[in-house]
Image (cartoon, rainbow, N blue to C red):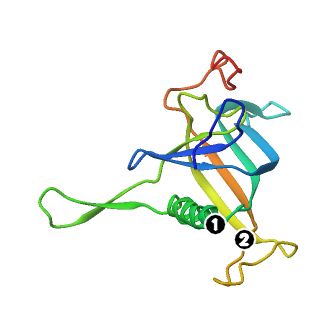
Amino acid sequence: IAPKAKGDFYVRIKDLRVNTFTYFRGYVTGITENVSPSFTSTNYIGRSEPVYVYERAERDLSFNLRVYPANPEEMNAIYGKLNTLTSLAYPMYLDETDGSSIRMKAPFTELYMAHIGSRAKGQFGFIKSLSYTVNESGDWDMESMLPRLFDIAISYQILNRKPTDRFTPFYMSSQS
């Protein structure tokens, strides 16, 4: 179920293995972004404190998404999306050209949500972890005996296709 109009909030994930989009509408809460620079210390004889050398920085994002279907068609769609989302934690296997063995294709994605990514192109990365919680205050479908309300915790590792520096635009504006 893709967005209908401008201003319709959603989370969009593009599976770069097969170039397909998955859209989630729901309540997004608990957006946490971590930026972690790493330094290595070196000790020198005659110096009372270590010297630090910059190594790298990592950036990741965590958020919670609550989804609930409004009707049976949306319930089927949500379960399909949950299957697709879970598949993004696993590789896709490709046959070698000689047909002798199989190799893995990593589940890299592009994420668009709020200030992460732009409408034209999401933020490159991969899903670090997924956690599904069936909320105890949610209801269950009596025919299929399946839960309808899901709380999804997503942790996303942000990667960059080019080396980043102090001039890299890390956040997209509303004009992007």
Residue that mark 2 sits on? 148
- Image location (x, y in percent) of residue 33: 76, 41
Q: Are marks 2 and 1 in contact (CB under 8 Å)?
A: yes
Q: Answer with left or right where residue 59 lies relative to residue 103.
A: right
Q: Secondary structure at mark 2?
A: loop
Local packing at callout 2 (Cα closer than 10 Å; few below 14, some 14-19, many 20+) is many
Q: Answer with left or right where residue 97 lies relative to residue 160.
A: left
Local packing at callout 1 (Cα closer than 10 Å; few below 14, some 14-19, many 20+) is some
- Image location (x, y in percent) of residue 55: 63, 34
* Total numbered labels placed on residues in the image: 2
- Image location (x, y in percent) of residue 29: 82, 49
User: What residue is at 70 percent from the left and 68 percent from the top?
Assistant: 132
User: What residue is at 74 percent from the left and 49 percent from the top?
Assistant: 62
Q: Quadrant of residue 174 in the image?
A: top right
Up-down relation of residue 143 to residue 88 (above or below): below
Residue type marked 2: Arg
Up-down relation of residue 173 to residue 98 (above or below): above
Q: Answer with left or right where residue 34 lies relative to residue 125.
A: right
Residue that mark 1 sits on? 75
Question: What separation in Å lies between label 2 and label 1 (alpha carbons)?
Answer: 7 Å
Lower position in the chain sequence, tag 2 or tag 1 = 1
| In the foreground, 65 or 70 | 70
User: What residue is at 64 percent from the left and 15 percent from the top?
Assistant: 167
Up-down relation of residue 24 to residue 76 (above or below): above
Q: Secondary structure at mark 1?
A: helix
User: What residue is at 61 percent from the left and 62 percent from the top?
Assistant: 78
